[in-house]
Amino acid sequence: MKTIIAAAAATLIAGAAFADGHCAAGKTLTDGTLTIATGNPAYYPWVIDDAPEAGQGFEAAVAYAIAAEMGFDAGAVTWVRTSFDEAIQPGAKNFDMNMQQFSITADRDRVVDFSAAYYIAPQAVMTTTEAVEAGAKPTMESLRAMKWGVVASTTALPVVMETINPDQSPLVYDDNANITAAMQAGQIDAALFDLPTALFTSAVLMDNGVVLGQFDPSAAENPDQFGALMPEGSALKACVDEALAALTDNGKLAAIEAEWLQDAVGVPLIK
């Protein structure tokens, strides 16, 4: 009986914390608790050691920053796991928001809600250890000398042709998998991916992959923008957007990005 009374009291206290006009009051799955989903497993640099509750890694850190901005302390955040595909399907969800590198697209936005973007993915140069000297820093001159592969349907082609302007015409492929295979076979030296794809591909799909450098996101005409995914019609969306706007204005979002996606990852900007 004492346990039941204590639990009821805790619920009342949590509800009271959001009773005074708080944006999130009555808008989460569980009053006073923010339920956040991530992948199963969740990978570096988004979540360190597959432990989002530690707040280490870019998305884990952003998630706790959003929660704090909305008035939830770390103890009021609960983590659950979903696959990428099940999260973007229509229907009921077991989370208030889900963060696992969801690009904001019109097709997805028809069946789920997205927050404002918390990350704009720059384009990055992926190559192999055989194609570059150890410790080599990217320069436009060195990039022009490389043999390039591109996927014609992406924004990589105009960036390669207009920004890099390689000495040899790039080879054109159907998809990223074919480019990766061509790179491992030594048919091309380099390709342009969004930074998250480059990091994952070089670390997980290749034995000899290297992310040589990244371009400023403004160099891409239509860069990938990542948003927190929420159930369609989520009443919490306005609160999350408000929190992200505050984190942008006060510089905290930029500081988290610098810590986990620039300093820690060690991918230099190509100038």
Image (cartoon, helix red, strand yellow):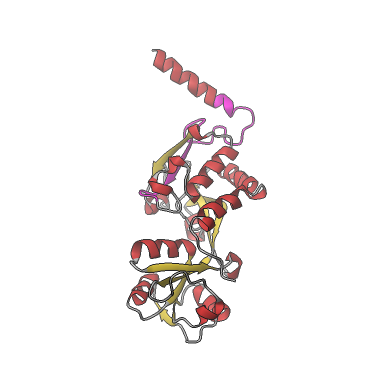
Q: Is residue 233 visible?
A: no
| Residue drawn at (46%, 81%) of the image | 146
Outermost residue toward the right in this view: 249
Q: Nearer the viewer, residue 264 or 237?
A: 264
Q: Position of residue 95 (x, y in %)?
A: 44, 41
For residue 263: magenta?
Answer: no
Q: Position of residue 88 (x, y in %)?
A: 43, 53
**Quadrant of the drawing holding the N terminus:** top left
Outermost residue toward the top in this view: 1
- Check the image and report above or below for 104 versus 67: below
Read off the magenta span: 15-42
Q: Nearer the viewer, residue 83 or 149?
A: 149
Question: Horizontally, is 242 left or right of 229 in the view?
Answer: right
Question: Horizontally, is 250 left or right of 132 in the view?
Answer: right
| Residue drawn at (67%, 49%) of the image | 249
- Check the image and report above or below for 123 versus 30: below
Most common secondary structure along the magenta stretch: loop
Which image quadrant for residue 219? Answer: bottom right
